[in-house]
C-alpha cells in the first residue's frame, strides 16, 4: 500500500517562518544572551511551539505549523470486468473474482509438483490441476501493467494468470502472462499444448496456494 505525504502551508505561513529564521539570526548577531545561541533557539522552537509563536507575534501556534496529511491509496481491481481481448482472440473461460484490493503479500506464485520435479507439465494437464484453486484472472494482469510500480521485484520473469483462458486467433488455447523483458514489463502468452517448466508459475491467492 503506497503512502503519499502532502505538505500544506499557506504563503503567509511561509513568510512568517522566514521572518522567524531571520529574526533568530539577528538575535545571535546582536548577542541576545537572554535568548541563547542558534542551536538552543532552534531546539526551543522545535520543543515549544508557543515560544516560536511569541517570537513572531502569533497567538495560536497552529498558525505557523505545517499540516501533514497521510493519504493511503488503495488499489482496487475489478476482477468481475470483461478481460482485455486482443484482436482476433476469444475468451474461452473467465473466472470472476469480485473486487480485489491489491496486496502482493496475499498473492502466491504456484508451481505443481510435476513442474518442481520434472522438466515440464503439459499446459492442458496443469489447467485441470488448477481448476479448484483461486487463480487470478487477466484483469489483475492488465491492472498491474497499468501500474508497474505495484509489481514485486521477485516476479521478474514470467507469471501466468490462469483465471482467464483465451482461444488465440490460430485456434490454440492460451494463457496470458506478465513478463519482464529488458527494461520493462509487458505481456505474452503460453500455449496449453506446450510444456510448462518451473520458470512458469501461476498467480493465485496465497491463502489457498
Image (cartoon, rainbow, N blue to C red):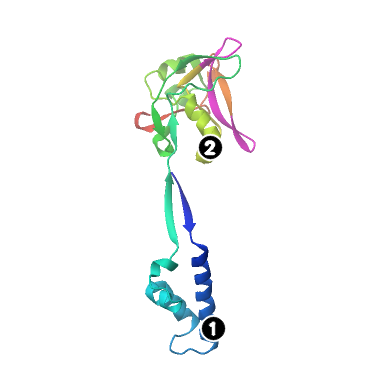
Query: Residue 88: which quarter of the image?
Result: top right
| Left or right: residue 84 compared with residue 111 | right
Q: Residues within 10 Å of mark 2 (few under 14, many from 20)?
A: few
Q: Residue 132 sits in which quadrant?
A: top left
- Disc 2 secondary structure class: loop
Residue 180 is inside the magenta segment = yes
Instruction: Please provide percent x and percent y for residue 38.
Output: 50, 81
Which residue is depicted at the point 44% across and 28% down?
Answer: 78
Where is residue 61? Give x, y as percent.
39, 70
Which segment is the magenta one? 166-186
Q: Pick whichever, 2 or 21, lies toward us.
A: 21
At 38% from the left and 23% from the top, the residue drawn is 133
Q: What element carries label 1?
A: helix
Compared with 41, 113 (above or below) is above
Residue that numbered label 2 is attached to? 147
Q: Is residue 6 magenta?
A: no
Q: Position of residue 96 (x, y in %)?
A: 41, 22
Mark 1 or mark 2, earlier in chain: 1
Amino acid at each position: 500500500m503506497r503512502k503519499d505525504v502532502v505538505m500544506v502551508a499557506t504563503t503567509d505561513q511561509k513568510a512568517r517562518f522566514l521572518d522567524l529564521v531571520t529574526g533568530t539570526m539577528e538575535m545571535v548577531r546582536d548577542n541576545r544572551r537572554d535568548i541563547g545561541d542558534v542551536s538552543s533557539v532552534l531546539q526551543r522552537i522545535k520543543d515549544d511551539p508557543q515560544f516560536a509563536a511569541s517570537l513572531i507575534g502569533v497567538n495560536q501556534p497552529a498558525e505557523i505549523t505545517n499540516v501533514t496529511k497521510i493519504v493511503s491509496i488503495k488499489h482496487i481491481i475489478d476482477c468481475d470486468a470483461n478481460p482485455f481481448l486482443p484482436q482476433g482472440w476469444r475468451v474461452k473461460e473467465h473466472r470472476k473474482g469480485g473486487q480485489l484490493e491489491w496486496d502482493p503479500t496475499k498473492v502466491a506464485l504456484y508451481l505443481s509438483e510435476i513442474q518442481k520435479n520434472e522438466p515440464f507439465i503439459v499446459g492442458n494437464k496443469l489447467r485441470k490441476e488448477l481448476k479448484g484453486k483461486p487463480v487470478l484472472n487477466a484483469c489483475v494482469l492488465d491492472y498491474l501493467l497499468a501500474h508497474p510500480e505495484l509489481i514485486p521485484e521477485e516476479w521478474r520473469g514470467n507469471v501466468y494468470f490462469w483465471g482467464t483462458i483465451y482461444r488465440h486467433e490460430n485456434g490454440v488455447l492460451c494463457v496470458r502472462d506478465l513478463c519482464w523483458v529488458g527494461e520493462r514489463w509487458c505481456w505474452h502468452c503460453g500455449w496449453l499444448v506446450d510444456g510448462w517448466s518451473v520458470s512458469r508459475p501461476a498467480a493465485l491467492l496465497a491463502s489457498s496456494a
